[in-house]
Amino acid sequence: MSLLTSTAADFLDEIEEWAPADQDDAMWVRCEQDLALFCAAFFPDRFSLPFNQMHRAFLSRDKTRWQERQRPSKVADAAPRGGAKSTIESFASLIHDAVYGFEHYVCILSTTFDLSEDLVEDLHRAFLDEEANEDLHRVFGPFMVTGTKTDFVVRVPGCDMRGTRFKAFSFGSTIRGTKHVGVRPSKVVMDDSEHPDRVRSPDQRNKTADFLQKDILKAGDRFTVYRMIGTVLHGDAVLARVLASPGWTSTKWRAVQKWPTAMGMWQTCKALWEELDDPDRLETARAYYEANQVTMDEGASVLWPEGESLWDLMVLLWSDGQAAFNSEKQNEPSDPDRQAFDVETFRRCTFDGVHIVNANGRKVSLNTCRVGFWLDPRASSEIKRNDYSALAMVARDTAGYRYVLRCDLVRDSPAAARARVWALWEVFSHLRGAKWAYEDNGFAALNDEGWERERERRRMAGTAYNLTVKGYASTTNKHDRILRLQPDIANGHLQFAEDLSPLVLAQFRDLGSGTHDDGPDAIERADWLVSEHGRMPAVKHGGW
């Protein structure tokens, strides 16, 4: 039996009785061409689960030393988020490159420079921390590390004493022209290098693609390996373009490879999971699944059952929604121009000013709810655009259901909008702990000072005046904020009053393609006020 060609299990069995020094020598020889064993043997804390088909594809790709390569190569993988792609490609494989001298200079790029630095700092720690990586240092060290945490050179006994350089870059910071000891990069790793906020704009996507072509792909030489790994964030994202390019060797991986055939039973299970009135809803749904698991698993195939089981993935689908799941787990992002919300499926409630009757028929007293009011006033520039000011009211009951009880859309001035808030407060001022807020969009003088003047005027007139309204500046993308409501609306966790204005529902229906989104925006912000930032807790699932 050859120790180089036998299975890893047979190899380890064979050397088990050898002297420790001979074992180390055998591991050094075997792991040069066995990256999977290298990962499992030297980083067992990071690779505690079995490898899946995608991991094995990564691990089995041939490696040759940079001096021996005659032409550049370009390899791309679209992998499910959380699938341990970075653990292999941006950590273990790069350490392997250094200890065997496969690479001379590795450039690492991510979405932002901070993320790139994190990846390089992780490598730096592995080469410096002998106590945490005792086996690695014993078999391959001692390592000589010079430079900074984010731009360093590691020299390994028996390898080229120029060492292997690792340096962090970000997508957009020029890489062309960089060298190590006069030699261009031998490997460029692009790990989740597209920013979610920038991928929406055609101009930004073209700019990123242009940077890839004119800077990154021009930075190397005949021996350079270009490695792109990430998740497809948009149908026209750079990674999506690369996957379709004949110049790249590429693969798209999906967390769910085949869906189960008994989807009706999964819908029944989902209904149990959705039931917030059941304090043990997760256990109830899980018990239903376990009682019917053989039938419910039939026909299904998942990429990594040990890390993300079918159950884990289905719960993630329910909690995050179809659009997010398709993008992050299936690498099939939704078309942003398609209808985002199907208002015909919105679950409805009724509200008489005192009680809510939800879609399940349960009666809820408003006094027992957490209530949030949000005003999105128009600035002077928006008046010219004929936009609306929106005043939304959302309540959350003790079970966790939320209810959009009203959303008034009026084309009025900031002062008139504040007057509507005062009028609404006079109706609901008895609600203890209610939150009143508004969008502080940079026109604070029209709002903060306005509230103060009006409070003082009401105080002087002997009218109730102790309304506290807090201004918030929303810094995240508005479209994304509204879309985060999708799964909770689909699950019936966010319901809409029957008498809600049809204009508000039309704005949900036309989101992305319509002119106005003032109502959905104000509703999302009011929901944020009462929902501990808007999301029901998802079930944590496994993974490295």
Image: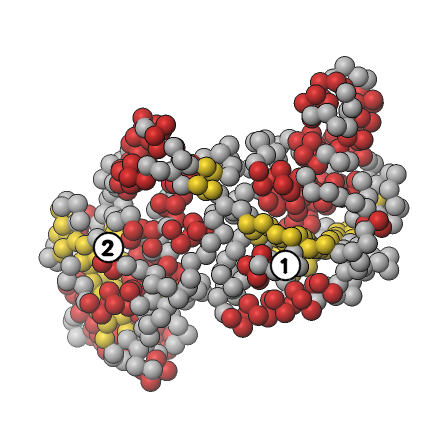
Figure quadrant of the N terminus? top right
Picture residue at 39% right of the left edge, 45% below the top: 317
Between residue 136 and residue 460, name the one nearer to us.
Answer: 136
Q: Amino acid at mark 1?
A: Pro
Residue 164, horizontal then vertical, whole percent: 80, 48
Is residue 65 found left or right of 449 in the rendered image?
right
Determine whether the residue tagged by mark 1 lies in a helix, strand or loop.
loop
Q: Which residue is drawn at the image coordinates 71% and 18% (left, top)?
A: 13
Q: Residues within 10 Å of mark 1 (few under 14, many from 20)?
A: few
Residue 537, x across and y down, in percent: 37, 44
Q: Nearer the viewer, mark 2 or mark 1?
A: 1
In percent of width and height, residue 286 lies at 34, 31
Q: Quadrant of residue 17?
A: top right
Q: Secondary structure at mark 2?
A: helix
Residue 505, located in which quarter of the rendered image? bottom left
Who's the residue at 14% across and 62% down the image? 499
The one of 71 and 465 positioned closer to us in this rendering? 71
> Which color scheme did the rendering employ for the protein?
secondary structure
Residue 246's disc number:
1
Identify which residue is drawn at 87% across, 49% down.
162
Label annotation for residue 219: none
Q: Tell me the quadrant of the picture where the C terminus can be found.
A: top right
User: Could you tell whether 409 is left or right of 299 in the image?
Assistant: left
Residue for badge 2: 345
The amino acid on which the numbered mark 2 sits, given as a three-letter code, is Thr
Q: Quadrant of residue 102?
A: top right
Q: Does 303 sit above or below residue 48?
A: below
Q: Residue furthest front?
A: 246
Residue 94 in view, yes or no: yes
Residue 115 can be seen, yes or no:
no
Horizontally, residue 89 falls left or right of residue 4, namely: left
**Rendering coords of residue 212 (x, y %):** 65, 64
